[in-house]
Image (spheres, coloured by chain):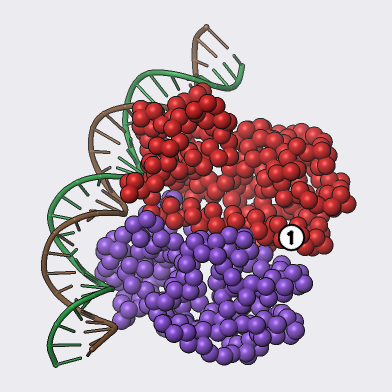
Chain colours: A red, B purple, C green, D brown
DNA sequence: GGCAAAACATGACTTTTGTCATGAATGCTC
DNA sequence: GAGCATTCATGACAAAAGTCATGTTTTGCC
């Protein structure tokens, strides 16, 4: 598989405003810009592997990426789904550990790679950027704490409903009365995201469809009734 | 409940060497030291509450503390069990959010409180300290990712065995051939740690005891056979 | 030391979820 | 467009875990 490169100027990147690099001084940004490598990935390609040493930071310019851990049987658990503007691989970099997860492209992606030296240099000499990174990391941690508690306490049905609503926030394209989730996940990926078996996801999505909470649109899902879905996501509506 | 204060000099704190404050310049440490308040807590007292605004950082000098999230039915999920030398409440502080969890004393504790202004000042002017904090946070995140995957994929039996081994690392007192877990958790707390029902924990611990993997010593548990316990913690020993 | 309240324990039962088997639909490749 | 592989779907069943009820033991407290 040959690497297909592309070029883009960070200053002109559409996603700069959504990214942690937003607010960097022109010099810092151009340091990043001048030392990056940008590569196009096809669906199914891996960006990095669990257990390997990180050598830099990935910044997504286009496409979608899943970050997951696999157990011995090869069953995946999706930790994050990353989209343009997101950083990838910073946790292992900052903790100075090996990657704890694998990143695989869900939809053809354009991803920039920043050597860790350059990232660290900008981080070091730029306390404001550092502070933003720390804040982001800690927010992410809060999200993970919430998700852990849900894994511990909620039923699969509740979690699936919750995941639908979660993806609605990130990938929802508002229509009138309904929202199309602009991300094509296989049933298996849904199962990996929710932490359950594929068959269970299939059955529950059918349930939700029967109840007219969602509908299927090709490989994508349309959320028809977010309010009732939220009730499904919570406890037995106390 | 009246506050019972105590005094201690950070420089002389037994846990300094285990703590993130280790390596701080004498000036920075004395800034922390001179602005802290130290309070004694009894078992069962709360240190902070989910949903409230953090005003500083807690540093544990003695005792043990559980940090947990509660669901609507009041069921707890224990995120961390903190021990002397550990920081408490830094996540919410650094993410500038409300507390996402509640902290309750498990065993009578002595805890120092550092106003956030002082913590932030030391953090700001001390890049090395900042870097250590970031590293710690990201390591913690890695642990959480691992735990999430286990919640998603492992059975309760496996998770309970895993929790026993995990607490063995932090609270194990080596004997010959066996290790006493120097922490008294109720069955309910074990359930909150593993993410299951109290009855299930009771049954499984009995199983483990029957299988001579553990024994009960008052309110504490002795790990008799860590190796076989590790097999229980993993998949069906592939 | 005695009493009340927690904590621990156990049985019976239900529900949820996973697993396995099989088949239909869809997509991809030559 | 035929054929193969993958994904999606469904049924039947088993296993895991939760819930409820009840009883016992331990603990804390006056």
Q: Nearer the viewer, residue A234 or D15?
A: A234
- Label 1's element? helix
Position of B122 relative to B144 (above/below) = below
Residue A42 seen from this side:
yes
Residue B235 seen from this side:
no
Residue drawn where x is 75% and y is 37% of the image: A14
Residue drawn where x is 62% and y is 33% of the image: A107
Position of B169 relative to B197 (above/below) = below
Q: Nearer the viewer, residue A82 or A232?
A: A232
The reply, left or right, for residue A219 in relation to residue A89 is left
Position of A170 relative to B140 (above/below) = above
**Mark 1 highlights which residue?**
A130
Residue B14 locus on image (x, y percent): 58, 87
Residue D17 locus on image (x, y percent): 31, 54
User: Furthest residue to the right?
Assistant: A27
Q: Which of B16 and B116 is in front in this view?
A: B116
Position of B90 relative to A206 (above/below) = below
Q: Nearer the viewer, residue B155 or D30?
A: D30
Q: In which quarter of the image is residue B168?
A: bottom left
Q: In which quarter of the image is residue A231?
A: top left
- Mark 1 is surrounded, within 10 Å at the Cα level, by few (under 14), some (14 to 19) or many (20 or more) other residues, namely many
Residue B25 locus on image (x, y percent): 75, 82
The reply, left or right, for residue A142 in relation to residue D17 is right
Give the chain letter at badge 1: A
Residue drawn where x is 67% and y is 73% of the image: B117
The reply, left or right, for residue B78 in relation to residue B95 is left
Residue drawn where x is 78% and y is 55% of the image: A119
For the N terminus of chain A, which image quadrant?
top right
Count of numbered labels shown in the rendering: 1
């Amino acid at each position: 598989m040959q690497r297909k490169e592309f070029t883009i100027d960070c200053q002109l990147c559409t996603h700069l405003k959504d990214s942690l690099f937003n607010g960097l001084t022109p010099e810092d940004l151009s340091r990043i810009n001048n030392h990056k490598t940008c590569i196009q990935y096809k669906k199914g390609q891996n960006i990095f592997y669990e257990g390997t040493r990180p050598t830099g930071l990935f910044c997504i310019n286009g496409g979608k990426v899943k970050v997951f851990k696999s157990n011995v049987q090869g069953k995946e658990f999706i930790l994050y789904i990353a989209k343009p503007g997101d950083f990838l691989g910073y946790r292992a970099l900052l903790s100075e550990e090996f990657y704890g997860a694998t990143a695989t492209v869900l939809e053809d992606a354009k991803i920039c790679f920043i050597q860790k030296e350059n990232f660290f240099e900008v981080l070091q000499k730029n306390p404001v950027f550092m502070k933003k990174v720390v804040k982001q990391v800690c927010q992410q941690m809060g999200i993970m704490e919430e998700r852990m508690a849900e894994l511990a306490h909620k039923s699969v049905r509740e979690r699936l409903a919750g995941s639908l609503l979660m993806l609605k926030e990130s990938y929802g394209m508002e229509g009138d009365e309904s929202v199309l989730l602009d991300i094509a996940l296989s049933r298996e990926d849904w199962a990996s995201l929710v932490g359950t078996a594929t068959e269970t996801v299939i059955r529950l999505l059918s349930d939700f469809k029967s109840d007219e909470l969602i509908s299927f649109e090709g490989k994508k899902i349309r959320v028809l009734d977010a309010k009732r879905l939220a009730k499904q996501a919570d406890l037995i509506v106390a």
